[in-house]
Amino acid sequence: MDQYIGKMLDNRYEIMELIGSGGMANVYKAKCHRLNRMVAVKILKSELAENADFRRRFRDESRAVAALSHANIVSVYDVSRSGDVEYIVMELIEGITLKQYMERRGQMDWREALHFITQIMRGLSHAHSRGIIHRDIKPQNIMVLRDGSVKVADFGIACLASAGQTLTQEALGSVHYISPEQARGDRTDARSDIYSAGVVLYEMLTGKLPFDGDSAVSVAIQHLSSVPLSPRSINPEIPEALELICMKAMNPNADKRYATADAMIDDLEKFRKDPAMDVEYIRTELEEDVNSEPTQAIKASEVAALTRANNAKKAASAQDAEKKRTRKLMAIIGGSFAALLLVVVLLFKIFGSFGTAPEANGHVVPDLLGKTVEQANQMKEVKGIFQIDVLGSKPSDRYQPGQIIEQDPVAGRTRKNNLVIHVYVCAKEEKEYMPPLVGMNYQEAKVQLNNMGMGLKVDIREEFNDEYQAGAIISTTPAAQEEIQKGNSVLLVVSKGPEKKPIVVPSFLTLSVDEASAEAQKLGLTVGEPQFIYSPKPAGQVIEQSIAASTSVDAGTTIVFIVSKGGEPKSQSITFTIPETYSGQITISFEQDGVSRGESVVTLEEGQGGTVTYTFSGEAGTTSTVRALINGEEIGSKEITF
């Protein structure tokens, strides 16, 4: 059995069960007895907790993160130490990690990926604005709640993990998402988190990682020197603008990424409102970007192995080059004559043919809008010159299904190379149906409706409801799976929670405190801590109540009972004789009915003895046995009646 289960930390957090385990810490479900709520407690593993410097940084980082307060960040409630146990107390999340969610769902719909990445970036924006960098953004550190919202976890502790992490096989889970500067060991900033978030978006859109390999170091090298497949080459349904936003976030050159999380959120919001937004500026940046930065050392043993392999390749290449040099010399002699002949042929083609030479300044891109792909390929301005690449289909009110509605580059541009025209064709009109939204939080429901791109007008009506919690959708008009058209109005009926009906408070006087508490709770009142006072009434009887009888209050209102302790206590002073055998400074203890009541100290001369008096108290009419003792030995005992 786990050593912590059943243990109480700081006399406050009761460890209930293990709910997660990682390389640095274990996570437990626990109950906070002070605030009467369930929490998550993350306990550092013993080998880390033994390091004093790590403990200090752990506490400093965690306390900084505890200052964060955002809907998309897991809240940190407390950072403490109980004996030799270092722990963090966090919000308990009822959900699964984004990694688990993706494993269940596979490749996501791009609308869902947009919904998730926007929330992740909002959480990062909040943290970055307070100077906190995560440094380990990955789907395993992102929680998906039942209502579709996400929360970023492990701020602070992730910083510590990355600080001491080597790129070994054990690090493979994180290395798929690290930025190039992290792989090099350079200084990191907010843009490192943006790169990692871009990788997460790539994985959500495609169901694949941009780079993969057998070892952590091989994956890290790819982050430094390789270009991933474009998301649209894996899933053509991804809108081009969202692909470009993803690739800009993943730019290996930190200066060409989004400078801030807010900048990326701005583009995501523009795209959400208009999936056909103009992103030519991003495309231009990506086309011009050439990552020529050399790969730096990551781990000595790994790099040494790579170096030996490269040296062996170079030696083999040198031998091949010597053999080729001899063959090349003979080829040059024969090739010279062939080259001369080729020049003559080219001159003849240029000056001897009319109207067939390519334009000196390139080819003008023709206007393809309104034509089918087949018609466009037969145009003389296209045939034999341009290649038409269909990226996908989109709805359009201006064109018929199958006609080209967008092209890139646009008509009139001149191209000397890269003679490919990317086009979208008009989609066949497909029926859309109302999604199932009942039980979902109304804000998430509105986002889902907006992301359908149908320009739906969403109205909200609130009603009291005993079944659904406040903010949840009770019903929709149209109902789920009913057909909807562009621009339709949609009504969402939202729960205000149970209706609070007024309670008429009765009189609880003359009842015992237990009877009164039970009756009050049945009515829907909250019972506060009772107060006890002396009175002539029988002990335990309610003699006052904080809310007067016949008063109307809301359910959940707190009522406090004043309870009788019985009559005022009586007192009686009893004198005990101290035997002559005791002398010097003597401590006498007193008991009443076997319960210790107090002590007295007296000084006696040798052989003289003495007396000592003590006052006992009790309820009127009761009888008690009182005793005086010296070093546990009884020197006197009496039975008294109050």
Image: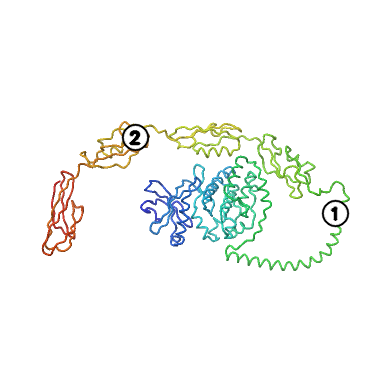
Residue 172 spot, x, y in % from top left: 55, 57
Q: Residues within 10 Å of mark 1 (few under 14, many from 20)?
A: few
Q: Residue furthest right?
A: 352
Give whichever of 101, 93 is nearer the camera: 93
Give whichever of 108, 10 is nearer the camera: 10
Residue 63 spot, x, y in % from top left: 45, 53
Q: How is the image coloured?
A: rainbow
Quadrant (top left/top right/bottom left/bottom right) for the N terminus: bottom left
Dot 2 falls on a residue whose secondary structure is helix
Q: Can you say whether 551 is above or below 626 in the image?
A: above
- Would residue 7 be visible to someone looking at this image? no
Checking the image for residue 523, the label placed there is: 2
Residue 173 spot, x, y in % from top left: 54, 55
Name the amino acid, label 2.
Leu
Q: Residues within 10 Å of mark 2 (few under 14, many from 20)?
A: some
Name the amino acid, label 1.
Leu
- Would residue 584 be visible to someone looking at this image? yes
Q: Which residue is mark 1?
A: 346
Q: Can you say whether 586 is above or below 258 in the image?
A: below
Dot 1 falls on a residue whose secondary structure is helix
**Which residue does the image show at 65% across and 37% down from the upper left?**
395
